Image (spheres, grey):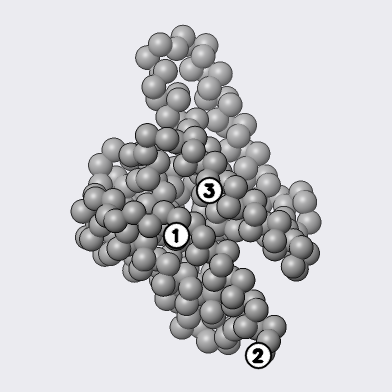
Amino acid sequence: MNGTLLKVIALVAMTLDHIGMILYPGVNEFRVVGRLAYPIFAYMIAEGFRYTRYRWRYFSIIWVIGLVCSVIDYIARGSLYQSIFITFAISILYMLGSSYVKDQYKHMTRYQHVLWALICIVVLGLTAYICYGKPIPGFIIDYGFWGIVTPVIIYLANTKTAKFIALTVGLRILSFELGPNQIYALWALPLLALYNGERGPGFKLFFYVYYPLHLGVLYMIKQIYW
């Protein structure tokens, strides 16, 4: 399967998950199927960053959409919950930093190596503090610390086997943090094993617009009919 087909599968799973979350909170089957979405998107975010020639533009698009979703959510519900776009935007920032260090590593002095290691520790610690310490009441990043880190370790892995190990470790930790339903995210691994490395037909705009659009439609249905 190419990347586009995998993302369509993730999109369907995500839609069913949000139908369950918004319209049918008592029907757990929707949430179970929805667990397929995160691992596929996390894997494709890492792959997209690896192969794109416009990495900062890639980050900017994800970040701006995330900010728009956050603003709309705050206006509509007074919520500080940050969508998966913010999660993945932070992941891409980590990848940008990792890519820079990897490219410059051979030209750095020993002191620069130490400095970058300290910067990495501080940034990871700050991210963990924001996710676990919750210094801002109500400010929650979707999928939390390991939701941010998992695409990064997939990107840093050099082989498909290593990528699958990285994804499996991330998903297993998330299952401990987010509850028993999250274990079903491992069902995405057989689908990702069929990934042929090809991007597939480009529907970038559709994928970017769909997230806020389908949430808006679902909340509108809930207001009118529920």
Q: Position of residue 219 (x, y in %)?
A: 64, 76
Q: Are marks 2 and 1 in contact (CB under 8 Å)?
A: no
Q: Which residue is mark 1?
A: 207
The residue at 65%/54% (across/down) is 68
**Which amino acid, by three-letter code, is at mark 1?**
Phe
**Which amino acid, by three-letter code, is at mark 3?**
Ile
The residue at 68%/47% (across/down) is 130
Secondary structure state at the residue bearing disc 1: helix
Secondary structure state at the residue bearing disc 2: helix
The residue at 53%/46% (across/down) is 61
Q: Which residue is mark 3?
A: 62
Number of other residues with Cα within 10 Å of mark 2, as a class: few under 14, some 14 to 19, many 20 or more:
few
In the figure, 76 relative to 129: above or below? below
Residue situated in front as seen by the camera: 89 or 56: 56
The residue at 51%/60% (across/down) is 209
**Which amino acid, by three-letter code, is at mark 2?**
Tyr
Q: Which residue is mark 2?
A: 225
* Between discs 2 and 3, the one toward the N terminus: 3
Distance from the alpha carbon under mark 2 to that under mark 3:
32 Å
Q: Quadrant of the N terminus?
A: bottom left
* Between discs 2 and 1, the one toward the N terminus: 1
In the figure, 31 relative to 71: above or below? below
Q: Quadrant of the C terminus?
A: bottom right
In the figure, 46 relative to 96: above or below? below
Distance from the alpha carbon under mark 2 to that under mark 1:
27 Å
